[in-house]
Image (cartoon, helix red, strand yellow):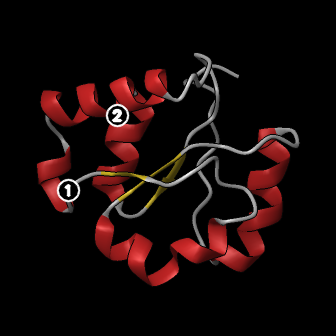
Amino acid sequence: MSSAEAPVIVGDLGSALGQIAEIGGGRRLPVVSDPHVHSLHGHRLSAIADGPPILVPRGEQAKSWAVLAAIIDELALRGIPRGTPVIAFGGGSVGDVARVA
């Protein structure tokens, strides 16, 4: 699935978990989140997450070259193959930077 085809799921996490797992095709997926959202709800992703989340700053601070490079570096360190879907768990800025990564 290319980034142009990557689905965006918005809504209740409980309802979305099955869809997210289906997108992963049975494999665990990396998660990009901000510390606040992850501290509140991240435990709900434990069954489908590939390790701890890659945490990024909240809001517009997430949209920087340095944050993007840190996400890419962490994905590479974890051996995540290019083209693997990434769970962007948080607000719009989290989704924006995770989608580019």
Q: Is residue 101 above or below residue 57?
A: above
Quadrant where the N terminus sits is top right
Query: What amino acid is at disc 2?
Result: Ile
Q: Is residue 32 above or below residue 71?
A: below
Residue at coordinates 39% horizontally, 31% vertically from top-left?
74
Q: Earlier in the sequence, mark 2 or mark 1?
A: 1
In the displayed structure image, the side of residue 49 where residue 70 appears, left or right: left
Query: Which residue is tagged 2?
Result: 71
Residue at coordinates 51% horizontally, 79% vertically from top-left?
41
How many C-alpha atoms fall within 10 Å of the one at disc 1: few (<14), some, or many (≥20)? Answer: some
Residue at coordinates 73% horizontally, 45% vertically from top-left?
28
Q: Is residue 89 above or below residue 66?
A: below
In the displayed structure image, the side of residue 73 where residue 20 appears, left or right: right
Give the structural element (helix, strand or loop) at label 1.
Answer: loop
Residue 38 location (% of width, % of height): 43, 71
Residue 70 location (% of width, % of height): 26, 32
- Residue extending furthest bottom? 40
Query: Which residue is tagged 1?
Result: 57
Q: Report which quarter residue 92 is drawn in.
A: bottom left
Residue 16 location (% of width, % of height): 72, 67
Residue at coordinates 21% horizontally, 37% vertically from top-left?
67
**Whole-Å distance between the Cαs marked 2 and 1?**
12 Å
Residue 81 numbered tag: none
Q: Nearer the viewer, residue 62 or 55?
A: 55
Residue 8 location (% of width, % of height): 58, 49
In the displayed structure image, the side of residue 88 where residue 54 appears, left or right: left
Asked if the residue at tag 1 contacts the one at tag 2, i.e. Cβ–Cβ closer than 8 Å, the answer is no
How many C-alpha atoms fall within 10 Å of the one at disc 2: few (<14), some, or many (≥20)? Answer: many
Query: What amino acid is at disc 1?
Result: Pro
Q: Report which quarter residue 17 is drawn in.
A: bottom right
